[in-house]
Image (cartoon, rainbow, N blue to C red):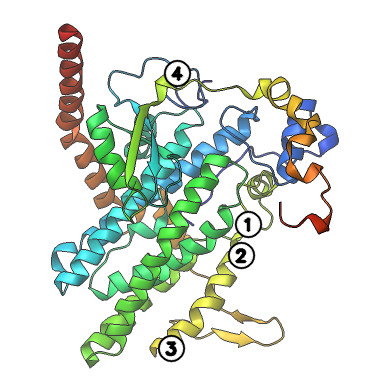
Amino acid sequence: MYAQMIKSTGKGVKSLDEMEPEERAFQERINAGGKIEPKDWMPDGYRKTLIRQIGQHAHSEIVGQLPEGNWITRAPTLERKAILLAKVQDEAGHGLYLYCAAETLGVSRDQLTRDLLSGKMKYSSIFNYPTLTWADMGAVGWLVDGAAIMNQVPLQRTSYGPYARAMVRICKEESFHQRQGFDIMMKMANGTEAQRKMAQDALNRFWYPSLMMFGPSDKDSVHSAQSMAWKIKMNTNDELRQKFVDQTAPQAAYLGLTIPDEHLEWNEERGHYDFSEPDWDEFFDVLQGNGPCSVDRMEARNKAWDEGRWVREGLLAHAEKKRARKMAAE
Amino acid sequence: MSSPESGSYDATEAAPHGKPRATEWPLWEVFIRGQHGLSHRHVGSLHAADAESAIKNARDVYTRRNEGVSIWVVEAAAIAASSPEEKGPLYEPSNDKVYRHPTFFNIPDDVGAM
């Protein structure tokens, strides 16, 4: 997902009886569907895991602007350009909502940014793939945002109040993103032969990276078990991946495009599609920073941070000067 | 409240608000009034160098879809908040005053709407 392989405490989930009274009250509140707010007591592991998860999610929104920003100047029409601009601006907004939620846990925005720029914190593997043609804007909206929605909709019910509220805002906007992507795919799939081929090629390249977004199977992961007990992870990776395939396969058929998986087939007995796993070696390699665009993405973020420094400092100095003048006048 | 992964950081709603770091723009809480006459409502927060740019940023971050017709921003450091430990003494006294709710009183149906 936008947050992949998030480490938790690494220990098994404690039973209520093993907990100190404070932690027990905390867990019982979560079990009853209550929300945890910034000033409430929380276990250190909950706080740390949430900072990692929300931070990685925020970084993904910000880095996720790059593959789409790549096509703003080359959008085929003025209307498509305006729509893509609005979409990329939304992604910046999503990043900001999430950074604010992470900040309520006691980490600073600058610290989170520094950890991204140094490579200490990660962002979703999906944004390390290139966007080679205009059809990729369609595939990204349809598949990548589609996969993100699978995870984000249940997270609106997550136990941490500020995170849940950020998710509510994000989900409201995300459906525009997926629809604009599908709209591009419809246009391309029903266009000239060259356009149809371009759409098929985009689907071929983005299908497996999209499946990887959910992360490897986590049915035996202690990290996942703890995060699910804390309700900061609402479904297993496999559940969400299956849901995504079930939803997307008929959409591809509608477009007249072929999902690049010869084993993709409806399984009447299970009531789900069977499908092939992505190449997990590739996933781990990309996560290690060896994706086709990993170096580019980090360079772009570092450049933006370094070159924006005079703006950050200048505006702060200006604000201080104005404040000093106002005080002097009073 | 300090962060587990960095030094202590006090410009959040989680902490008693101190002076923000000089290198980082201060944190502002944003309140928006929608079109339908309801009060300003807290929608989130953002960083900005001063109030003027905080309002501009709030316009971009929180009203991209006609969510509001009025924006308030206030430095997070200026907000005083009740603490969770006071929850009992602050809110429990209202629990036994059920007569404050109109449903406490049984009015016969014959009386009509009231």
B22 to A37, vertically: above or below = above
Residue at mark 3 to residue at mark 4: CA–CA distance? 55 Å
Three-letter residue code for mark 2: Asp
Query: What subunit carries mark 3?
Result: A
B83 to A72, vertically: above or below = above
Residue at mark 1 to residue at mark 2: CA–CA distance? 7 Å
Residue at mark 1 to residue at mark 4: CA–CA distance? 40 Å
Asked if residue A38 can be seen in this view, the reply is yes
Three-letter residue code for mark 1: Asp
* Residue A39 rendering spot, x and y as whole percentages: 58, 27
Query: Which residue position is annotated with label 1?
Result: A218
Query: Which numbered disc, 1 or 2, marks the residue that appears first in the sequence?
Result: 1
Query: Which residue position is annotated with label 4?
Result: B17
Three-letter residue code for mark 4: His
Horizontal placement of B15 versus B96: left or right? left
- Residue in front for this viewpoint, A277 or A132: A132
Horizontal placement of A217 versus A76: left or right? right
User: Residue A47: which quarter of the image?
Assistant: top right
Residue at mark 3 to residue at mark 2: CA–CA distance? 25 Å
The residue mark sitting in front, 3 or 2, is 3
Query: Which residue position is annotated with label 3?
Result: A254
Asked whether the residues under the numbered discs 1 and 2 touch, taking CB atoms below 8 Å apart as contact, a structural biologist would say yes
Query: Which residue position is annotated with label 2?
Result: A238
